């Protein structure tokens, strides 16, 4: 049984379908024209936690700052060091430009190089801190690496950063959305006007993406991981090794960093309950290899390879108390 029948003809249907399409196309063209003319606000695409941190660190590297010590590395460097406390102990201004484990070492060197260009003849020491979990990753994330490098290259321009937020080979519908100017509205207007809530514990600790940006600035690029470590709920494989890619990346790191700055390298700790009996030996071997490839001036050999479980937020991040302890130990290593 047929309940309804519809009869259409192209002459009547065309205005109904083509009218909205034409209107959207004209609006998209208008936004693109405004963008090219510099009439739209600068890109502010902090639409999630990862982008907020990556774009903040690229922005921070491009600002005038009195830092003489730069921290770079994965998220353990971001979370395990209380940068203002380190500055106070060493009596030297310090800035943390750490990002994530899936951003390659070469990109971190570009952060250092940008800072040195903006603040010439100022940088004394570059401290690379990295977790053994990161060192066994076979490859970095091309998406996040491209996001950081493009943000660095466009930091002082008014161009869109949209190209870094897409897959390597955008699908046709994504290209169509770009033509309609949706990315311009999202990144230049929506990202600025509407704060995005952070997920889970980070949302409860920091609130929204805009709050996270302000916290990163206030804490000189470092954060506190708000989680609570539970070894019973944290499966861990502690058979650590260095993936082959790190030799080339470490050598590139040395080449890109300014030649007048010392390079110090250290490894961040593990929870004591999951460490293997040969943990100290494995740490020492990995640190020696990294130091050789980096041609490092300082090996931070006295940093702890393990710390008590109660001082961890996750498998790779210390909590607020743990980072105070680790920061003090790091300062003692850097003082000489």
Image (tube, rainbow, N blue to C red):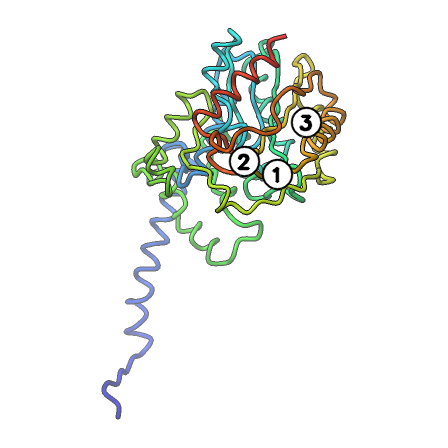
Query: Contact, CB < 8 Å: mark 3 with mark 1?
Result: no
Identify the residue shown where x is 59% and y is 43%: 141
Residue with the mark numbered 3: 253
First in sequence: mark 3 vs mark 1? 1
For disc 3, the neighbor class at 10 Å (few under 14, some 14 to 19, many from 20) is many
Identify the residue shown where x is 69% and y is 15%: 259
Where the N terminus falls, by quadrant? Answer: bottom left
Q: Quadrant of residue 192?
A: top left
Residue 188, given in percent of the width and then of the height, sits at 37, 37
Residue 195, given in percent of the width and then of the height, sits at 31, 37
Disc 3 to disc 2, C-alpha distance? 23 Å
Residue with the mark numbered 2: 316
Position above or below: 32 against 24: above
Position above or below: 49 against 288: below
Query: Contact, CB < 8 Å: mark 2 with mark 1?
Result: yes
Residue with the mark numbered 1: 133
Question: In the figure, is residue 144 to the left or right of 48?
Answer: right
- Along the line of sight, the residue nearer the viewer: 11 or 121: 121
């Amino acid at each position: 049984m047929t309940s309804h029948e519809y009869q259409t003809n192209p002459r009547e249907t065309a205005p109904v379908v083509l009218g909205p399409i034409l209107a959207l196309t004209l609006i998209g063209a208008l936004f693109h024209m405004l963008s090219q003319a510099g009439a739209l606000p600068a890109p502010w695409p902090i639409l999630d936690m990862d982008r907020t941190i990556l774009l903040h660190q690229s922005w921070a590297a491009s600002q005038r700052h009195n830092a003489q010590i730069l921290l770079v590395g994965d998220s353990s460097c971001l979370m395990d060091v209380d940068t203002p406390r380190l500055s106070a102990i060493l009596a030297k201004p310090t800035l943390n430009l750490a990002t994530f484990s899936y951003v390659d070492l070469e990109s971190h060197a570009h952060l250092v190089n940008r800072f040195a260009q903006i603040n010439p003849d100022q940088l004394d020491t570059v401290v690379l801190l990295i977790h053994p979990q990161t060192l066994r990753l076979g490859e970095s994330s091309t998406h996040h690496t491209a996001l950081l490098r493009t943000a660095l290259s466009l930091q002082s321009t008014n161009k869109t950063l949209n190209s870094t937020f897409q897959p390597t080979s955008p699908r046709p519908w994504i290209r169509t959305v770009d033509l309609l100017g949706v990315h311009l509205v999202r990144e230049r207007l929506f990202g600025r006007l509407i704060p995005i809530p952070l997920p889970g514990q980070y949302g409860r600790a920091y609130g929204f993406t805009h709050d996270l940006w302000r916290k990163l600035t206030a804490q000189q690029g470092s954060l506190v991981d708000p989680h609570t470590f539970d070894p019973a709920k944290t499966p861990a494989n502690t058979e650590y090794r260095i993936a082959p890619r790190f030799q080339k990346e470490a050598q590139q790191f040395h080449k890109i960093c300014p030649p007048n700055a010392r390079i110090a390298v250290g490894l961040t700790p593990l929870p004591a309950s999951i460490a293997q009996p040969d943990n100290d030996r494995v740490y020492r071997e990995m640190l020696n290899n990294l130091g050789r490839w980096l041609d490092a001036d300082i090996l931070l050999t006295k940093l702890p390879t393990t710390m008590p479980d109660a001082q961890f937020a996750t498998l790779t991040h210390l909590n607020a108390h743990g980072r105070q302890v680790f920061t003090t130990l790091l300062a003692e290593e850097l003082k000489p």
